[in-house]
Amino acid sequence: MEFTHLNDKGEAYMVNVGDKAVTARAATACATMRMRPATLDALQNGTLKKGDAIAAARIAGILAAKQTAALIPLCHPIPIDSVTIDITPQPPDCLRIVAFAHTTYKTGIEMEALTAASVAALTVYDMCKAIDRSMAIENIRLLEKSGGHSGLWAAKTV
C-alpha cells in the first residue's frame, strides 16, 4: 500500500496539489448528540443560562471550517465558498448536526465539513454542560463528497 502523505523515506509531508485541476467540490458531514430529554427541551425552548446554544454552535461550526488547516497538520488551507450548519432536534433525546461545505479549488473540503460538525457539537456541549454532563457526541462522519478526481461518494447509510 502506498501512502499519499509519506515521502520515500516514510516521513510525513504535505501533498503537492499544484498540478490538480480546480473543480467544484462539496462535502456533507454530521454529528449526533445524545442528551437528557430535559436538556433537549432547554435547547429548543431557549432557556439555557448561557443563551442560544444552537445559534452559537452554528457560528462556531462555520468558524471552525475556516480554521481547519490550522488544526489538521497536513490539511491544505483552501478557499471556502460556503458553509452551512443545520441543527435539528430529534426528540426525545437527540440533536443532529449536519455541516455542508463547498469550494472551487484543487483539493477536497471533507475535513472542513467534518471539523464544522465536530466543533458545532462541542459548542452545544460547552453551553449545556452545566445541566447535563452526560451528553455524548456520536457518529461524526462524512455523509457525502463530490468533485475532484474521485467524483461522487456517499455513505451507504445515513
Image (spheres, rainbow, N blue to C red):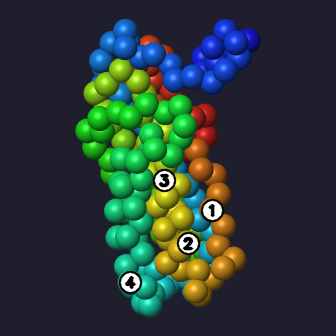
Q: Position of residue 121 (x, y in %)?
A: 52, 63
For label 3, count other residues whose C-alpha is less than 10 Å away and answer few (under 14), some (14-19) or many (20+).
many
In the displayed structure image, the side of residue 50 where residue 155 appears, left or right = right
Tell me the CA gap for discs 4 and 3.
Answer: 20 Å
Res 31 seen here = yes
Residue annotated with mark 3? 117
In the displayed structure image, the side of residue 133 where residue 40 appears, left or right = left
Q: Position of residue 95 (x, y in %)?
A: 53, 66
Q: Residue at x 45, y 40 (%)?
A: 69
Q: Residue at x 37, y 14 (%)?
A: 18
Near-viewer residue (101 or 20): 20
Q: Residue at x 49, y 58 (%)?
A: 119
Q: In the rendering, which numbered label is found on residue 137?
A: 1
Residue annotated with mark 4? 51
Q: Earlier in the sequence, mark 4 or mark 2?
A: 4
Q: In the rendering, which numbered label is found on residue 125?
A: 2
Q: Earlier in the sequence, mark 3 or mark 1?
A: 3
Q: Are marks 4 and 3 in contact (CB under 8 Å)?
A: no
Q: Secondary structure at mark 4?
A: loop
Near-viewer residue (143 or 77): 77
- The disc labelled 4 sits on which kind of residue? Gly
Q: Earlier in the sequence, mark 1 or mark 2?
A: 2
> Which of the image's four quarters has the N terminus?
top right
Q: Position of residue 51 (x, y in %)?
A: 38, 84
Q: Position of residue 66 (x, y in %)?
A: 36, 47
Q: Earlier in the sequence, mark 4 or mark 3?
A: 4
- The disc labelled 1 sits on which kind of residue? Ile
Tell me the CA gap for discs 3 and 1.
Answer: 10 Å
Q: Quadrant of residue 155?
A: top right
Q: Are marks 1 and 2 in contact (CB under 8 Å)?
A: yes
Q: Secondary structure at mark 3?
A: helix
